[in-house]
Image (cartoon, rainbow, N blue to C red):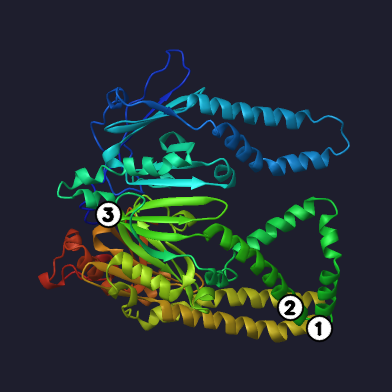
Amino acid sequence: MTAPGGGDPTAVDDLPTVVTRVEGDDDEGSRPEPSTSPGADAGSDAAPASGSEPVAEAVDPEAPWERLSWRMLLVDPLGSLTRLAPLFLISLWLGSNRSNYWFEFIIISLVVLAGVLRWLSTSYQVGRTHIILRKGFFSRQVVTVARNRIRSVDTESDLFHRVMRVSIVEVGTGRSDAGKSGAERFRLNAIDTAHVEPLRDELLKHRRALDPSLGIEDEEQWGSKYGEDIARWRVTWSRFAPFSFIGFGVLMSLWLITWQMGDMHQRIMDLAVVEGTIAWLDSLGEPFAMVGKGIAIWLVASVLAIITYAIRYGKYALTERGSVLYVQNGILRRKHQALDKARLRGVEVRAPIYLRMIGGGRLEPIMTGTKSGGKASTLLPQAPMKDVRRVATRILGDETPVTVRLRRHPWKAARRRITRGLMPFWVVAALLILIRIDSGPSADVWVRWGIPAAFVLFILLSIDRIRMLGHALLSDTLVSSHGSWGAKRTVLESDGIIAWTVSQSVFQRTARVATVTAATPAGAGGYSVMDMDADEVWALAEALTPGITDVWQYEGAPEDAGRTSPSMGVRRH
């Protein structure tokens, strides 16, 4: 059951205006489509705008039209050919005995031609009121953004960009990246790196006009050269990298590549250190050999994870400049991201059990216009939990939501954590029994050791889920926590909540608990408090969004209104 909530008071002011015109080759010629302002998607807290200015009126006759750097003619084909490298390797491997390579020459020629056409057809203008991007050769596209709607200017540069001293610049208006089509993205790939800082400062200069009381000194704080560091990457943070799945992903990719490359995989397996390790582990017998091989694979994956983590987050820095948070990270592929604190609705502290065991976690923003769960929106990568709490406190401006003791849920909710947590155990036990039936007495060791070990593991995970389950209700903030393997603590401001949803499964109705979800246009779009007492869910919603339960037409005593919903089993008087 869903009830609408209070809207964001800044929704009208934060409304993104993106005017897009797409010209195609049709029978009637090129005709501009109506101007649109896509502000009412799931990633924005704004309503649709009306009266968007036509593209012709947005053009500044006094502002020059600029082209991308000529070095794009080298960077763009190199990047495309790098992404096509697996295709070339497979082609060369399959056709190792042929005498011509027309297929490769044709692909390279098409990639180079596409880069030339992209450079010739792309131009942009930074006017007094709008910025305009024209792109596309066969299908012309014009993207117009009002300068007073700009919320971020993000930059990105991979290895080829850095060698050629160019960068990718993307202008954000607060709309979620997940909801943007290619025609709506104001993305410049690539401009001279020396022009990035002046362009960012110019595009963010309009913020002084939003508050006439600001002086020149205040305006300077919006510039990219000013601000205060909140956190910077440390080499010691790499110890958290092995406790993630990124290393296994890299290892699997390398294994597939070597497996496809003829005898490369066999050469690796024939190395003396590999053969010696496998022989020693096999001498231990089952199941110790299997456990040892798993640990060996984890050690190799850990080395790859540390290298990948350092490449991805090396030179990470989180800086606060005025009311903008600047995030930069990466060694080979440098990324600079600007996050407007006016669009911040909370934070999410992610602390899965494999990170908490060594005192680590990571921090993500709950913010309109950013994707949730992606590396692009990470405020703080895997780092010590004390640093995670410190950064969260600094961003929120209050330590209470980060450290407050959570209210425990009913014992029936704890019982559900155990019953649901043991479901994988029964699957594992059934598989081990089937292995015993199929293999005979030789598999007794798996039943003797595997079933008790699995039972202890899943019981411990269930107890950890009980410990992490809870919520706290502050004056204007909802704090919730749940999970174990993917545990997270969510801090959500009440101003960002636009609706409430209460749901009950068959088993939840039997236990008289319910899950209440606060819907928000920021982050994941909804954040849940799981397995609350069913008679308290709407009281929680009423406390954070006064008047939300007025939709229930009670016939009983007035003091009962707003406490519970008729759908939660409350009888009418």
450 horizontally vs 321: left or right: right
Identify residue type, mark 3. Answer: Ala
Judged by depth in the image, the label closer to the viewer, 3 or 1, is 3
Q: Are marks 2 and 1 in contact (CB under 8 Å)?
A: yes
Residue 523 placement: quadrant: bottom left
Indicate the secondary structure of the residue bearing disc 3. Answer: helix
Can residue 57 be spotted in the picture?
yes
Q: Which quarter shows the N terminus?
A: bottom left
Indicate the secondary structure of the residue bearing disc 2. Answer: helix
Please, which residue is most extreme toward the top here?
28
Residue 4 placement: quadrant: bottom left
Identify residue type, mark 2. Answer: Gly
Q: Which residue is drawn at 15% across and 72% down?
A: 560
Q: Residue at x 21, y 66 (%)?
A: 542
Q: Name the residue under label 2.
A: 292
Residue 342, disc:
3
Identify residue type, mark 1. Answer: Leu
* CA–CA distance in space, label 3 to label 2: 51 Å
